[in-house]
Image (cartoon, rainbow, N blue to C red):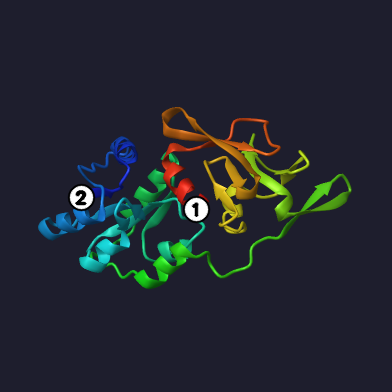
Amino acid sequence: MNVIIIEDEKPSARRLQRMLNVLDVKAETMLHSVEESIAWFQNNEHPDLIFLDIQLSDGLSFEIFEAIEIKSAIIFTTAYDEYALQAFKLNSIDYLLKPIDDDELEKAVNKYKERSFEKKSVTLDFNDIKKLLVNPLDREYKKRFSIKVGQHLKLINIDDIECFYSENKGTYLYTKEGRNYLLDTTLEQLEDELEPQTFFRINRKFFVNINAIKDMVSYTNSRLQIKLNSYNEQDVIVARERVKDFKFWLE
């Protein structure tokens, strides 16, 4: 299997390469920009499989496909789960949400191996997908959550929630008043329910509300520590792989 990685953050690319090595998948070629990728595809045989980041240092990776007719399967590696997810799934083998999980990576690779994928040109609707990357999907997001408290139901408005987090296999919301409540859902399900301009998944355990951020501090290994207005039960850390996208989201 001929595999390449297109990822502008070199530490992330090397980490993915190591993870693939464990699965006995060799990705000898790593590309880090739109310009470099276009030049490479013009002068090399196209691979069987591409692990593709969305936002590269010099533009969106879709620009590669607009310039070159690519004949490869794609697995997206992206932090843009809240945007254009359905478009990704329709036009690719799979998508992996950063930071990439070992089990999810293995499932995606197995999906590629099990699928009888005929080499053909990738047909992505670039204009529609890029529009979705810039603007949230035109859809309704949750405005409140109903929480069972004893024999009662309590309604909590989305604006009163500072963060969502997972702990001990449970999913919780935390309010401005300093109360946390157990939810009958998962963070993965919340990805499709939360308004992406307001909530961002900073790591595999936390969604934070932009209006609840009090301070941001540099942290070890190029990460960021988030200080929320009320929540202080545990450290709230932006994963290194998501720092760039988090800063983009803030703006």
Query: Local crowd at mark 1 within 10 Å, few (<14), some, or many (≥20)?
Result: few
State left or right for residue 45 relative to residue 77.
left
For the residues bearing labels 1 and 2, Cβ distance under 8 angstroms: no
Mark 1 or mark 2, which has the lower sequence index? 2
Q: Is residue 99 visible?
A: no
Q: CA distance from mark 1 to mark 2?
A: 38 Å
Q: From the viewer's side, name the closer residue of 42 and 185.
A: 42
Q: From the viewer's side, name the closer residue of 210 and 114.
A: 210
Residue at (12%, 55%) from the top-left corner? 44
Residue at (42%, 29%) from the top-left corner? 221
Q: Amino acid at mark 1?
A: Glu
How far from the left and from the top, in percent, is residue 38?
19, 58
State left or right for residue 48 relative to residue 62.
left
Residue at image mark 2: 2
Residue at (58%, 35%) from the top-left corner? 236
Residue at image mark 1: 251
Q: Amino acid at mark 2?
A: Asn
Query: Local crowd at mark 2 within 10 Å, few (<14), some, or many (≥20)?
Result: some
Q: Is residue 8 visible?
A: yes
Vertically, is 13 above or below 39? Answer: above
Quadrant location of residue 91?
Answer: bottom left
How far from the left and from the top, in percent, is residue 214?
63, 40
Quadrant location of residue 205?
Answer: top right
Vertically, is 108 above or below 179? Answer: below
